Each structure stands twice: as structure tokens, then as C-alpha cells.
Amino acid sequence: MMKRFLVLFLLVHLSLTAQIPDGKKVVSSLYVYTLETASSKLILKENRHFEAPNWSPDGSFLLINSNGQLEKIDLDGKNLGILNTGNIKQANNDHGYSFDGRTLFLSSGKPNGKGGSYIYRVPANGGDPIQITPLSPSYWHGVSPNGKWIVYCAERNDNYDVYKMHVDGGEEIRLTLAEGLDDGPEYSPDGKYIYFNSYRTGTMQIWRMYPDGSNLEQMTFDDRSNWFAHISPNNKFATIISYIEDQGQSHPFGKQVKLRLLNIETKEIIDLTDEFYGGQGTINVPSWSPDGKRFAYVQYGLKDSN
């Protein structure tokens, strides 16, 4: 079981190239979904691979990762340039801002290209990176509303669990203890809960717990593979990405998915989008607009490489 689990999880973080059919290239489309109109607007479509939009704290642009760097895209689709992250240029799709908008957290390999994924922080407008986690692999997913703690997914002792650590580094605190994958931890805006996805029941579902790891509560119960609960600024809803077919403990690129809205009080779920080609890179990180009226995501397509 453990060997199978490790193989499945590692597939998530391998090079995208291995997941693209021979003779094909990726087309990426950046969308903004508006809740009031229940509609998506295409912002940017390009013949390249990009991932995981964050909404800037001032609401003026979206931040995506591509080729190991972070790019700013305005809401008309104009590329505003690369966000300076110093000598860290292997950023993956786990990045996002603090609640006060002053700090950006990102996961990346080291400048020498060695090691897996470590967590760094930089000023929101860019600057010299400060390494937080000493161990790899560590994948950032959330920060507490008071700005003191990060939460992340990490592999330690052959198991992937949710951990937290002070933003200045220090002791690594394990929050989940179940066998199998626990991933995607994110604080609610009121700081009361950490939401995450877990395979502990044999299917990938959304859960939540208190910030100390206690009071575990399951939030979704259906036959979808449900990942990455991102909590709305008003603390009422969560966007989740759901794979149409069971993916076990993996969230691969290039599968049929849909985005759904979870009412965190009633646990009712409604569809926001039809099925589309996506998965890894679509909505890995917090992507709500500051006013909570919109969120961003990525759809994918394939084209002939010739």
C-alpha cells in the first residue's frame, strides 16, 4: 500500500512533460469566474504552460507561475512582467499572499538546482527570498490570518501530512497523523479552521480541523476526487476542484474536472463550471479576489507540436 501511495503522489510533482501525450503541446487559458453572473471570462490564452493563479492583494493583477518564475498578468490579459524572487527561479505552483498583503510565500527548489521543494518568503512586491523550511519536500498552501504561521504538505518518514511552522522558521509541527495523503491545507479567514484534503477514508475528500490538529470534521462525502478547498473572504464558501473519475491519491494534469462551490455551513455543493480539461495547475492555490466576488483558474488544451 505504501509503495503504491508513494508512486501515485510522486507522479503529481514530476515534470509536466511526462503527462503530455506525444506530439502535443499545452495551451493554457486563464479565466475569471464571477459569482453574481455565474459566468467565466477568458483573460489570457497562450500556447504555453502556466499554472495556479493568485489574486493580488490590491485586486489589480493575477500571479501565475511558468517555467519556474512568477508572472503578473493584469485583468485585461497584459503581462506586467516577472515578480522578483531573487535567486529562486524554480517556483512550482504552490504560492500565495499573506492576509495583510505584505508577504508572498512560494515553494521552489534551491538555486543550485538540488533538493526538492522548500518554502520561502519574499516581500509582496518582490525581493530577496528567505528560506523557511529546512527540509524537503515541503509545499506551501496557506498562512494564518495573523501572519504568524504557514501550513504546508510535506513528506516525512514515507508519509505525506499537513504541517505548520512559524513564518520565521523553527519547529515543524505535524498536524495530521493518518496513513495516506493529507494535502492542500489552508486557513479559513477567521482563523478558526484549517481546511485540507485527505485520503483517509479511501477517497479524496475535503476535511477541516482546528489549527492545533484537533476536532477533525469531514466536509465532502461524494464519489468525486475533491481537492484544494479555497475559502472565500466572507468565510461562507469554498471553491474546490473535483475530478470526474477517481484519481486515488493523485491530482494529475490532463483529466476531466469541474469547479464546485462548497457551502461550509450546510456542506451543500453546487457546480460552478461544466467539465473541462484540467487538474494539476488549475486552482492549486488561493485565488479569490479581495472582495470575494470572483476567483481565477486555468483550463488547459492540447495542440499538435508540429
Image (cartoon, rainbow, N blue to C red):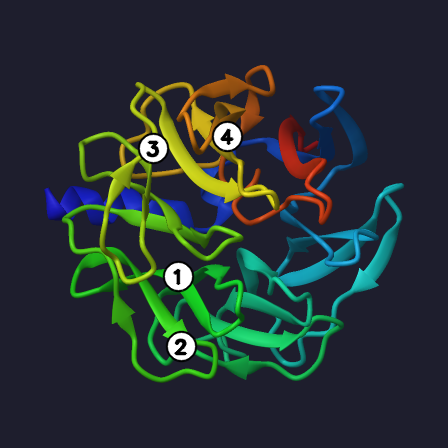
From this view, report whether residue 200 is shown above or below residue 245: below
Q: Position of residue 291 (x, y in %)?
A: 73, 44
From this view, report whether residue 282 is shown above or below residue 246: below
Find disc 3 in the rendering and name its residue.
Answer: 219
The reply to whether residue 26 is in sight is no
Query: Quick check: 116 left or right of 142?
Result: left
Query: Quick check: 304 left or right of 17?
Result: right
Q: Position of residue 90 (x, y in %)?
A: 57, 67
- Mark 4 or mark 3, which has the lower sequence index? 3
- Mark 4 or mark 2, which has the lower sequence index? 2
Q: Are marks 1 and 2 in contact (CB under 8 Å)?
A: yes
Find disc 4 in the rendering and name its residue.
Answer: 254
Q: Are marks 4 and 2 in contact (CB under 8 Å)?
A: no
**What amino acid type should be assigned to the residue bearing mark 3?**
Met
Q: Secondary structure at mark 4?
A: loop
How far apart, in angstroms, are the residues tagged by discs 1 and 3? 19 Å
**What amino acid type should be assigned to the residue bearing mark 2?**
Thr
Name the quadrant containing residue 11.
top left
- Mark 3 or mark 2, which has the lower sequence index? 2
Q: Residue furthest top?
A: 274
Q: Are marks 4 and 3 in contact (CB under 8 Å)?
A: no
Residue drawn at point x = 35 percent, y = 49 percent:
183
Find disc 2 in the rendering and name its residue.
Answer: 133
